[in-house]
């Protein structure tokens, strides 16, 4: 390793490995969903397998992927005195993730297709979910340090909605709120944390182009504006607001507070000419904008709902994919160890945009969400919309698979260099920092 370069510790690389693996596995689960929503191919998927595939896919592609990426970012500058504790939390989180996937596929119990966190109604699944989330929150807690620049403030502030989501869930269950409603509320709150993480990643991706960093005085209020609305629902629940009123409140808080700070921050970055060269920044901002527009068109439980959240989630995911590729780029000796290909980002962006168009078109035609496509009595427009959805889904899966094939072997190599006393001659070059100041 070249002197003068600081690199992430092994525990950070292992969280990154889990994150990339979770996203890759989510694409495998998504294959069943795409087949089930594609005309002619629906018969290849048994009807009773769709709900379980949806449970596993959503948890891998959101909760596990986002929490693991947060763990990888938060532990980049973890003091050596905390490495053993962090490693214990990592192992605990990995065990919880294995339990989620295994129970999602094989445990007896009914799949409950709750928004944000669909689950299998079985103690092993729910216990594994609690174990994984606890490990992620513990990692965020032990890695908290004083921020040194604007982006580090963003990564630090993003912890607040994670904490508020946990507080809300504990209060809701203590007040005997139903599990579906409690998870729905916690899922709403976590979105504020995901948005704040995305904004911090946008800033780091922009800075890699040579852009002069945004001042902390300007960035911190926007990060705070993105995160602090997560406080509203837990505070009102603690104050005794009835659960029925709280349910509609979640929707209104999300509708009016979840997007302005992120959109303003994205446009601020876009005003800098250099930023247009940042890996997938414009595509991520575009997906987020599409998701917002689709959200304004929701008037019932049609596929317009997944069109909305695939836009916002697609924006988060694309930013995180770009962050992974930036993290595994060499900090030095780039001549012998070139950076990884960014083509998977383009494939994913094109695929998810096509998928959103298909879902939105189907939603306009009244197609219900959370069910497989049925060609019985469907008119040509509905069939074409479903075919567009399937095509977009297939391209998205290909992009994620391509990304996993690029990222996972490199991350494995970086993990090995931290477990061998002497790195072999062909060991990968030291990885770059991403979340932390380089």
Image: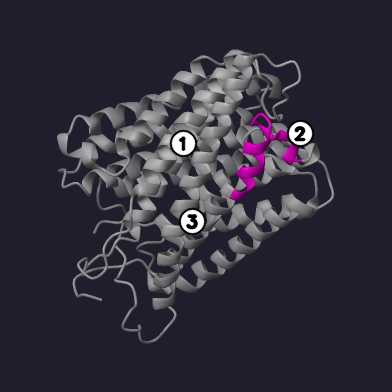
Marks 1 and 2, how far apart at CA: 36 Å
List x then y, in percent, for residue 378: 70, 16
| Quarter of the image where the C terminus is located | bottom left
Give how far apart the Cα atoms at labels 3 and 1 are: 18 Å
Q: Earlier in the sequence, mark 1 or mark 2?
A: 2
Q: Secondary structure at mark 2?
A: loop
| Magenta residues (range) | 28-45
Q: Is residue 435 visible?
A: no
Sequence order check: which comes first, mark 3 or mark 2?
3
The relative height of residue 177 versus residue 339 in the rendered view (above or below) is above
- What residue appears at the point 49 percent right and 36 percent down from the top-left corner? 313
- The 10 Å Cα crowd at callout 2, few under 14, some 14 to 19, many 20 or more, is few
Q: Please tell me which residue is depicted at 70% across the width and 20% down the height of the picture.
A: 244
Asked if one can make out residue 158 in the rendered structure from this viewpoint, the answer is yes
Residue shown at 74%/40% (left/top)?
45
Which label's residue is closer to the chain start, 3 or 1?
Answer: 3
For mark 1, what is the residue? 351
Q: Is residue 115 left or right of residue 197?
A: right
**Dividing the image into 4 quarters, which one contains the N terminus?**
bottom left
Which residue is the site of mark 3?
A: 20
Residue 234: name its quadrant. Answer: top right
Residue 2: where, in percent of width, then height? 21, 75
**Which mark's residue is nearer the viewer, 3 or 2?**
3
């Amino acid at each position: 390793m070249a002197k003068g370069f600081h690199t992430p510790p092994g525990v950070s690389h292992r969280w990154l490995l889990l994150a990339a693996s979770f996203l890759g596995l989510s694409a495998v689960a998504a294959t069943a969903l795409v087949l089930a929503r594609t005309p002619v191919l629906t018969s290849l998927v048994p009807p009773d397998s769709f709900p379980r595939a949806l449970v596993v896919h959503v948890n891998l592609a959101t909760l596990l992927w986002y929490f693991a990426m947060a763990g990888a970012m938060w532990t980049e500058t973890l003091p050596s005195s905390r490495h053993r504790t962090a490693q214990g939390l990592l192992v605990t989180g990995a065990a919880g993730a294995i339990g989620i996937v295994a129970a999602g596929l094989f445990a007896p119990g009914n799949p409950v297709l709750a928004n944000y966190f669909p689950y299998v109604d079985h103690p092993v699944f729910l216990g594994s979910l609690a174990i994984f989330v606890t490990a992620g929150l513990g990692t965020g807690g032990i890695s908290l340090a004083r921020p040194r620049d604007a982006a580090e403030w963003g990564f630090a502030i993003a912890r607040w909605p994670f904490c508020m989501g946990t507080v809300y869930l504990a209060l809701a269950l203590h007040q005997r709120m139903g599990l579906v409603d409690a998870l729905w509320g916690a899922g709403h709150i976590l979105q504020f944390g995901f948005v704040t993480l995305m904004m911090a990643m946008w800033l780091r991706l922009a800075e890699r182009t040579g852009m002069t960093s945004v001042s902390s005085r300007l960035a911190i209020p926007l990060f705070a504006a993105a995160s602090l609305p997560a406080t509203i629902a837990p505070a009102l629940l603690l104050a005794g607001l009835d659960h029925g009123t709280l349910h509609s409140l979640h929707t209104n808080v999300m509708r009016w507070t979840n997007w302005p700070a992120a959109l303003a921050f994205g446009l601020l970055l876009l005003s800098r000419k250099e930023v247009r060269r940042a890996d997938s920044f414009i595509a991520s901002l575009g997906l987020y904008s599409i998701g917002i527009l689709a959200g304004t068109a929701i008037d019932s439980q049609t596929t317009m709902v997944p069109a909305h959240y695939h836009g916002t989630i697609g924006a988060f995911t694309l930013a995180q994919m770009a962050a992974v590729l930036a993290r595994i780029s060499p900090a030095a000796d780039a001549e012998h160890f070139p950076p990884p290909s960014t083509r998977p980002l383009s494939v994913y962006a094109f695929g998810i945009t096509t998928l959103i168009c298909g879902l939105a078109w189907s939603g306009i035609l009244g197609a219900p969400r959370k069910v497989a496509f049925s060609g019985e009595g469907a008119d040509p427009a509905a069939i074409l919309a479903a075919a567009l959805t399937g095509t977009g889904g297939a391209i998205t899966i290909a992009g994620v698979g391509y990304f996993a094939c690029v990222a996972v072997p490199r991350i494995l190599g970086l993990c090995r260099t931290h477990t061998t006393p002497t790195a072999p001659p062909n060991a990968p070059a030291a990885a770059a920092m991403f979340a932390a100041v380089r």
